C-alpha cells in the first residue's frame, strides 16, 4: 500500500502524504514513495508544478514512534543510511525541474517542518503551526540545516534550531520561511490561484530560473554572474522565448 496519493489536474501534480492516523509522520516507506513520485514527475514534460500536502488535519508531524524506536535501536551505519535517505529527498526537491510547493495545514513539525522548508515555495493556513523541536529530545534538525540557513538569517536559524519552539504561519512568513499565510476558509482557493500561475508562464523559463537560483549557492559572485550569462543565452534559444519575442514584436 502506498503511503501517498497522487492526482493531476490542469498540469499540476498533487502529492498527498497519506498517513492521517499518524499525522503523516515520516517513515522509510513514505520517504521512498515521495522520492519515487518526484522522480516520475520530473520525467513528465506536461507538468508545470507539484503540490505536497497532508491528508487529514496535519501536514506532517516528523518521525513517528516506530521511526524513533528504530533510531534508538540502530547502530551508526543504519542511522547514517536513514539520515542519508531523508537527505536525498530534500536534495531531490531542489533537483526536480519544476516548482515544488508545500501546502501546509495543521502542524508541520520536526522532519515535517524540514520537508516544508525544503520545498521551493510554502503556503500555509493562518492556523498552521511550525517548529524544529528536535533539541527537546537531544536530536538535531541536521538534515534541513543547510536549507534553513539559506532561508533565514544566521541568528534566526540558530534560534530556531536550538530553542525548539513552535510558531505560527504568520511568524513563519515574517521569518522568511513561507511565502503566504492565508485564512483557513480561503486556503483552497488561494492555493489553486497561486499554483495556477505556473500554467500561464513559460515552463522552460521557470526551469532555467530554478536551476540557476540553486546553482548559485556554491558559486562566488563572479562565477554566479557567468552562470547567469550561460542561462540567459540558453533561454534566448528556447521555443518559449522565441515565440514570446515574436508576440511582443507584433504588438
Image: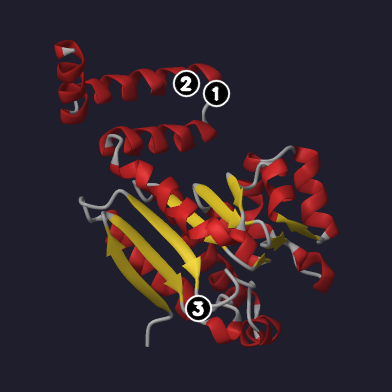
Q: Quick one: 5 or 43, which is closer to the camera?
A: 5
Q: Nearer the viewer, mark 3 or mark 2?
A: 3
Give the structural element (helix, strand or loop) at label 1: loop
Give the structural element (helix, strand or loop) at label 3: helix
Viewed as shown, does residue 129 lie left or right of 112? Answer: right
* Percent coordinates x, y for residue 187 in the rendering: 53, 57
For image coordinates 17% across by 19% down, the residue present is: 247
Q: Nearer the viewer, mark 1 or mark 3?
A: 3
Whole-number angstrom distance, CA of label 1 to CA of label 2: 5 Å
Q: Which residue is mark 3?
A: 28
Viewed as shown, does residue 97 lie left or right of 251? Answer: right
Q: Are marks 1 and 2 in contact (CB under 8 Å)?
A: yes
Q: Considering only order in the chain, which callout, 2 or 3, is on the residue closer to the N terminus?
A: 3
Quadrant assignment for the N terminus? bottom left
**Res. 126 image quadrant:** bottom right
Task: Give the colour scheme of this rendering.
Answer: secondary structure
* Percent coordinates x, y for residue 55 in the rendering: 50, 76
Q: Quick one: 136 or 165, which is closer to the camera?
A: 165
Q: Considering only order in the chain, which callout, 3 or 1, is on the residue closer to the N terminus?
A: 3
Query: Image height check: is 12 above or below 75?
Result: above
Q: Are marks 1 and 3 in contact (CB under 8 Å)?
A: no
Q: Dot 1: few (<14), some (14–19), or many (≥20) neighbours within 10 Å?
A: few
Whole-number angstrom distance, CA of label 1 to CA of label 3: 36 Å
Q: Which residue is mark 1?
A: 220
* Percent coordinates x, y for residue 119 in the rendering: 51, 52
* Percent coordinates x, y for residue 111 in the rendering: 63, 66
Q: Which residue is mark 2?
A: 223
Give the structural element (helix, strand or loop) at label 2: helix
Amino acid at each position: 500500500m502506498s503511503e501517498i496519493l497522487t492526482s493531476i489536474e490542469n498540469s499540476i501534480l498533487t502529492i498527498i502524504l497519506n498517513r492521517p492516523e499518524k499525522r503523516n509522520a515520516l517513515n522509510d516507506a513514505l520517504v521512498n514513495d515521495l522520492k519515487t513520485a518526484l522522480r516520475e514527475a520530473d520525467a513528465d514534460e506536461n507538468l508545470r508544478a507539484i503540490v505536497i500536502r497532508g491528508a487529514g488535519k496535519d501536514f506532517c508531524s516528523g518521525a513517528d514512534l516506530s521511526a524513533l524506536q528504530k533510531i534508538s535501536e540502530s547502530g551508526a551505519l543504519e542511522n547514517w543510511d536513514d539520515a542519508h535517505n531523508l537527505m536525498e529527498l530534500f536534495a531531490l526537491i531542489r533537483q526536480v525541474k519544476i516548482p515544488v510547493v508545500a501546502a501546509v495545514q495543521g502542524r508541520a513539525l520536526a522532519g515535517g517542518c524540514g520537508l516544508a522548508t525544503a520545498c521551493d515555495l510554502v503556503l500555509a493556513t493562518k492556523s498552521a503551526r511550525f517548529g524544529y523541536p528536535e533539541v527537546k529530545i537531544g536530536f538535531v534538525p541536521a538534515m534541513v540545516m543547510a536549507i534553513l540557513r539559506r532561508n533565514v538569517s544566521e541568528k534566526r536559524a540558530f534560534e530556531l534550531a536550538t530553542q525548539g519552539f513552535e510558531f505560527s504561519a504568520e511568524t513563519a512568513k515574517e521569518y522568511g520561511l513561507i511565502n503566504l499565510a492565508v485564512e483557513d476558509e480561503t486556503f483552497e482557493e488561494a492555493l489553486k490561484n497561486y499554483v495556477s500561475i505556473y500554467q500561464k508562464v513559460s515552463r522552460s523559463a521557470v526551469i532555467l530560473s530554478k536551476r540557476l537560483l540553486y546553482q548559485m549557492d556554491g558559486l562566488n559572485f563572479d562565477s554566479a554572474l557567468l552562470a547567469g550569462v550561460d542561462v540567459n543565452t540558453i533561454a534566448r534559444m528556447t521555443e518559449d522565448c522565441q515565440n514570446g519575442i515574436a508576440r511582443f514584436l507584433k504588438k
